[in-house]
Amino acid sequence: MDARKPGLRERKKALARRQISDVATRLFLERGYDEVTIADVAEAAGVAKMTVTNYFSRKEDLVFDQHAELVSHAARAISARAQGQSALAALRDAYFAALERQDASVGLAGEGFVEMITGSPALLARLREIDEQREAAIADTLAAETGEPVDDITVAIAAAQLAAVHRVLFRKAMRLTLDGVPRAVAQSVLSAMAARAFDQLQPSLGGYAIR
């Protein structure tokens, strides 16, 4: 058995976590985020309130149940870049691959879901925290890959620029959704925006952190 594969217990926990998040999201969309309590979620999911809080320490993370992926995916793409590939090129490839499969990391979601996020100060604040954590994760990875201190100005600026591309494109995706743009059209618009964004960073970061 491959030790890297999750065991039965881990799979059950992941399934339970996803089911609780799905129930919570349904309630939030039906009643409004601020009108639903953790106790409401527990009752609807058929679990104890403590079970919900064991899986989700914060109410906001019932919405952003994939926050760990949102934080780490860019840094992991840099760590996994091919020989001869720069950090910028790795992130570019990772973004377009995620966009192709309409992954949650690019911000494409249902209109009701996006309206819920943009209408809640708490959820918008959590989204900003995720942005900050993603930038920090990129900085940590760049420092490890280049051998420079994490507070080195080049590392810090590179991480800020790379994280900014994702943040801006994510917000553009949300705006397209709120404007009622069909998913396929939004995907095409984001593809063109992303190409321009990554091209703009090529002069400064195209030769940085090449493996």
Image (tube, rainbow, N blue to C red):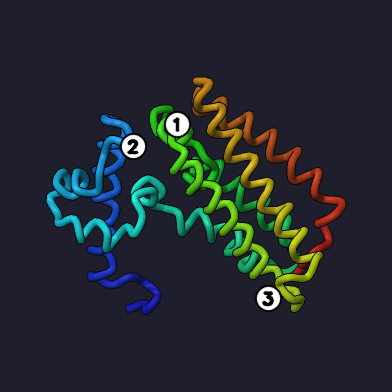
Q: Position of residue 103 (x, y in %)?
A: 48, 45
Which residue is at 67% across, 65% downward?
A: 139
Residue located beneath label 2 in the image: 33
Mark 1, Cα crowd under 10 Å, few <14 / some 14-19 / many 20+, is some
Mark 1 or mark 3, whichever is nearer to me: 1
Mark closer to the chain start, 3 or 2: 2
Q: In this view, does 34 lie above or below 207?
A: above
Q: Is disc 2 placed on a helix, strand or loop?
A: helix
User: Residue drawn at (68%, 75%), measured in percent from left and top?
Assistant: 144
Q: Residue 144 carries which label?
A: 3
Q: Do the residues labelled 2 and 1 touch (CB within 8 Å)?
A: yes
What is the quadrant of residue 100 in the picture? top right
First along the sequence among labels 2 and 1: 2
Which type of secondary structure does the marked residue at label 1 adopt? loop
- Asked if labels 2 and 3 touch by Cβ distance under 8 angstroms, the answer is no
Residue shown at 33% from the left, 37% from the top:
34
Which of 118 and 84 lies nearest the eye of the viewer?
118
| Disc nearest the viewer among 3 and 2 | 2
Gap between marks 1 and 3 measured at Cα: 38 Å
Q: How crowded is mark 3: few (under 14 residues within 10 Å), some or many (20 or more)?
A: few
Q: What kind of residue is marked 1?
A: Gly
On the image, numbered disc 1 is attached to which residue? 119
